[in-house]
Amino acid sequence: MKLHAALLFALLTLAVGCASTEPKRESFAQAQGTMTAADQLGAKRLPQAALYLQLAREEYARSKALLDDSLGYRASLMLQRSHVDADLALALLRAQVVDSEASDASQVFDEFQQHDEFQQQNRGVNGGSLCETSCSN
């Protein structure tokens, strides 16, 4: 019986300890920094990123409210959700930049290839350029 009481006391102590865990100031700063970065990179112009940034802001505000209500564990979880959604908004923006750069590189490559094909079509029969063939006469 004493073992069960001791075990129950230990579990309750652990549960209360976990339930009162409050998020650290650094966690709030990190979430806020990620939201700021996503905002500065233009999350408003990409609908999915704007949605996740808005969710992150709402969850951030909710985590502060939970903390004010002395619900530290829930506040910590909500703050983690906020940070993850802000990270997702940022990742979507970065993916858009990479896609845009890849598209630009592909366009430059296509232009180069067309230029190369044009030069090859304008070479003379003996492998010289048209100017070398026609100018030597």
Image (cartoon, rainbow, N blue to C red):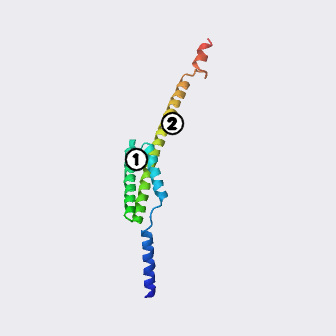
Q: Residues within 10 Å of mark 2 (few under 14, many from 20)?
A: few
Of pointers 1 and 2, the one earlier in the residue sequence: 1
Q: Is residue 107 above or below residue 10?
A: above
Between 76 and 93, the one nearer to me in the picture: 76
* SS for callout 1: helix
In which quarter of the view is residue 93 placed? Answer: top left
Between 11 and 119, the one nearer to me in the picture: 11
Q: CA distance from mark 1 to mark 2?
A: 24 Å
Mark 1 touching mark 2, by CB under 8 A? no
Residue 85 image offset from top left, x and y in percent: 41, 53
Residue 113 image offset from top left, x and y in percent: 52, 31
Looking at numbered disc 2 in the image, what kind of residue is underneath it?
Answer: Ala
Residue 126 image offset from top left, x and y in percent: 61, 21
- What label does residue 105 carry, if any? 2
* SS for callout 2: helix
* Disc 1 target residue: 49
